[in-house]
Image: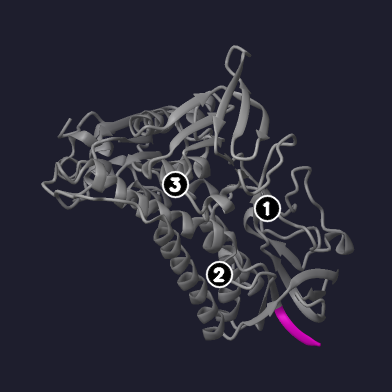
Amino acid sequence: MNTYDVAVIGSGPGGYVAAIRCAQLGLKTAIIEKYSTLGGTCLNVGCIPSKALLDSSHHYYDATKHFATHGINVEGLAVNFDQMIARKNEVVAQTSGGINYLMDKNNIDLLQGVGSFKDDTHIIITKEDGSSEEIEATKTIIATGSKPSTLPFIEVDKKRVITSTEALSLTEIPKHLIVIGGGVIGLELGSVYSRLGSQVSVIEYMPTITPGMDAMLSKELQKSLKKQGIKFFTGHKVTSVVNNGDEVIVTADNKKGVPTEFKGDYTLISVGRSPYTVGLGLENVGIKVTDRGQIETNEHLQTNVSNIYAIGDVVKGAMLAHKAEEEGTMVAELIAGQKPHIDYNLIPGVVYTWPEVACVGKTEEQLKEAGANYKSGIFAMRALGRARASMDIDGQIKVLADAETDEILGVHMIGARAADMIAEAVIAMEFRASSEDIARSSHAHPTYTEAFKEACLAVNDRAIHS
């Protein structure tokens, strides 16, 4: 029987990062993965393939809508959807293969199969051919991620009624894609197919899209996507989804409770994700799980079984790849006797539509609810020279700061390259910077990041270009 200091179950961003950090710290490490490819949901059917399709569709949309204005005449433009999907698959394969390389480089043993606890230090790994092996691990990190959720009355047939997994590998561009759920995943995949010519209807139960984000972001994003042709039906409660073969009929009660019918050739169920713990054998070791299916942990991400940890989508908190990575690193360092920490308030959130949306820290609604004394500064992207030059004038940046100390409490961005720009805000807040600190820092001209500086200047009514 092979013995390890640490066994990691799951090879997504949380799992493989945890394994690498453990190996770097001198711990003999194994990683257990049931699928034939490494990288989990993120690399295989999530972050990476969706960004590949978002980029491809963005190029096509720009060519059809903006190239003529730039003085570029394009004739006979057409989508080769098969090639678009093939490119996406190639990006996924390259990225997943890179994880295999990192496992080899760090001398991490890769064990293929389903890992299940026999007891708190022994794990049975069942392989695809039915055979099994047993290993012993002093510590174990559970990083099994999540799976798409659905509604109790909806049957996901993976043909016409689909999840994000199937939406990334369709064989045709939908004529009318009905998206149930106005969150991050639904809006991103809805954007892909809207750009490629699909009629897209987004049905959201809450009054606004991207619930939980700052209200400014939700409002601005909906306005921008509406201009791009996506239709929104907020405050609608879906009551049934019926697949009639080549047509899906979705019924939803509108804001007044009146049933409304939607007909499309595909329906994407995008109502969130659920922790995945199937087959882990948690009951064999008595690990506690919440009523939401999340594994219970303490502030060190330890379960109630002290030598077993859990990270990423399978525990409470935002289901984000970079959050899982931070947790994987933290647990590895805790196991090695170090004293790391994570400030969950400073885990950024991003929506990879165009314009992009990014945020970190407190929303204005949260500050109001807490009775905080704050001030805000807003700067519109259309006032930015760089944005006008690239024709990316939609969006704005809002900075929230403490009214007395001027410490930045929250940053909310919508605009071109917001996904990259938010990193400056995260760094600033990690070091407890004031809006004045950013306002006094030179930002290259012309760049999109000047908008962040201007928003910080606006906190104290000193914006130069608005």
Q: Which residue is mark 3?
A: 350
Callout 2 amino acid: Val
* Residue 16 coordinates in the image, percent (x, y): 58, 70
* Residue 18 coordinates in the image, percent (x, y): 59, 70
Contact (Cβ within 8 Å) of mark 1 with mark 3? no
Callout 1 amino acid: Val
Please report the residue visible at 37 percent of the width from the left and 37 percent of the height from the top: 405
* Residue 56 coordinates in the image, percent (x, y): 36, 55
Magenta stretch?
A: 1-5
Please report the residue visible at 86 percent of the width from the left and 64 percent of the height from the top: 285
Q: Earlier in the sequence, mark 2 or mark 3?
A: 2
Q: Which residue is mark 2?
A: 17
Residue nearer the viewer, 244 or 419: 244
Instruction: Characterize the magenta stretch by its predominant secondary structure.
Output: strand
Which quadrant of the structure image shows residue 326? bottom right
State whether residue 119 appears in this view: no
Q: Which residue is mark 1?
A: 315
Give the distance between the C-alpha atoms of the residues marked 1 and 3, in whole angstroms. Answer: 20 Å
Residue nearer the viewer, 358 or 46: 46
Q: Earlier in the sequence, mark 1 or mark 3?
A: 1
Quarter of the picture holding the C terminus: top left
Please report the residue visible at 48 percent of the width from the left and 43 percent of the height from the top: 174
Quarter of the picture holding the N terminus: bottom right
Give the distance between the C-alpha atoms of the residues marked 2 and 1, in whole angstroms. Answer: 17 Å
Residue nearer the viewer, 75 or 251: 75
Please state the total of marks drawn on the protein image.
Answer: 3
Callout 3 amino acid: Val
